[in-house]
Image (cartoon, helix red, strand yellow):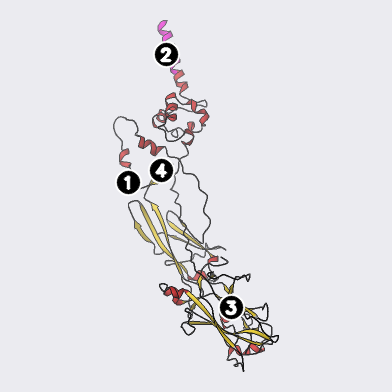
Amino acid sequence: MVMKLALVFLLMGYYRSSANAFSQDGAEYDPFVEGLLLDDVSPNLASQSSNNSQILPKSVRQSLSGSHRPHSLSNYLRLPESVAISASEDLTYLFKPERNARPLPNWVKNILLVTAPPITAPTRSHWIEIMCHIDRMAVRIRKRVFTNPKAWKYIKLKSCPVNQAVTDAEHYKFDFYLSGCGMELESTPDRVYYSTVLKYEPKVTGSIIRELPFSVPLECSYNRFHRSYKVGFQPRLHGRTLFRAFKANVGVTITPHDSFWNELPAGSTYPLGKPMYFEVKVPTSSKDQMVYVNSCFMTAVPDARATPKYTVIDNYGCMVDGLKTDQSKFLSRPSRTSLRFTVGAFVFKEIVYQRHNTDMTKLYMHCEITMGSVRPTPSAKSCNYDTETEMWQELHGGTSVCTCCDGQCPYPESAHRNMLTSHFWSMGSSGYDD
């Protein structure tokens, strides 16, 4: 009888011990958790909140609350998908199977007990963005960068053109495999790099450029080694966003303005590919006279005799640059003593091809100004070219005084003319209204 009672008590003790090895909802206690101080090996335990941590054995609770534990229990399952490491941190050889058992070193626990990094807010969108996929590179550039609606013809990712199939209303896009588009491969012990160049090379005709060519180096880099904490996934590779800003300074004496006709201070910038706004003024005039601009041309140096030069107004008031761009035109007069006009921004080719010469980044405007009759004449006029009708039109109406713009307008019989040279300004891809 004594032996039977002893056996009964022994069995009761066994079942009591077994019952203590389960949580309140039947989650089995895994002794491996106690040894690793890691509870993600038991999914049922993982569902328990920190308030239910009392279901763990006392030894586990004590070790979890110990000062040597690097993370709280609530952070155990907040594991990253992977952690990028350097080649020197690849310790695979230390995890080979071996006989018997031994306690895990602290450095192993630190590896196993990592937590996922906090989620950071996305950065603002830039002009040029790149996304590095596991086998290809995706690049997009905002269409607002360009003033030419056919800019896609001149954009290339090294040797590859724009993907028209994926281009949307706001972006030109590229999407190519890393093995194409002239990608250059570089490998180091820690990372693999794929690099290429995004180029914009607009067509150039004549001696001026209305859009600056540019090139932006792009690169996708990949870690060679990762520590994986979740099974059945591919590492999420975060792309690098690159943005190349072009800056310049502007300042003119023939008064420059913005599009709202606010005067721009010296040192401002005019954005390339957009109109430059100018106003010519004279102090006073008689009631029967108005100010006219006979001619205007630009040079890269203060000397009006220098070359190259580009003429925007010629033939006693013909806006000849209007034949090439509708951004160049005379505008309505605020008074008889002032004349406003716009010129499509441009640079000389030398500015692009001789950047080492700092003087070549500057532009000077030289204008011949005269006073003439309030009633326009072939020798004193302000004629714009209408690209739709392909005809010349005088600012104040009528076409007869402008017919000579296609030939040689008559020299004025007598007039007092002043040649003005502006202060320099420089061109940039961003400016006062960017």
Distance in Å between CA atoms under marks 4 and 1: 17 Å
Identify residue type, mark 1: Ser
Q: Which residue is mark 1?
A: 88
Q: Which residue is mark 4?
A: 228
Distance in Å between CA atoms under marks 1 and 2: 54 Å
Q: Is residue 226 visible to us here?
A: yes
2 drawn magenta? yes
Neighbourhood count class around disc 4 (C-alpha, 10 Å): few under 14, some 14–19, many 20 upward: some
Secondary element under disc 3, as helix, strand or loop, is loop
Residue 328's mark? Answer: 3
Neighbourhood count class around disc 1 (C-alpha, 10 Å): few under 14, some 14–19, many 20 upward: few
Nearer-the-camera pick, 213 or 68: 68
Q: Which residue is mark 2?
A: 10
Going from N to C along the chain, the mark reached first, 4 or 1, is 1
Q: Is 159 placed left or right of 148 in the picture?
A: left
Going from N to C along the chain, the mark reached first, 2 or 3, is 2
Nearer-the-camera pick, 412 or 68: 412
Identify residue type, mark 3: Ser
169 drawn magenta? no
Above-or-below relation of 3 to 276: above
Q: Are marks 4 and 2 in contact (CB under 8 Å)?
A: no
Q: Residue at x 64, y 82 (%)?
A: 389
Identify residue type, mark 4: Ser
Instruction: Name the mark nearer the viewer: 1 or 2.
Output: 1
Q: Which residues are magenta?
A: 1-14
Distance in Å between CA atoms under marks 4 and 2: 45 Å
Instruction: Name the mark nearer the viewer: 2 or 3.
Output: 3
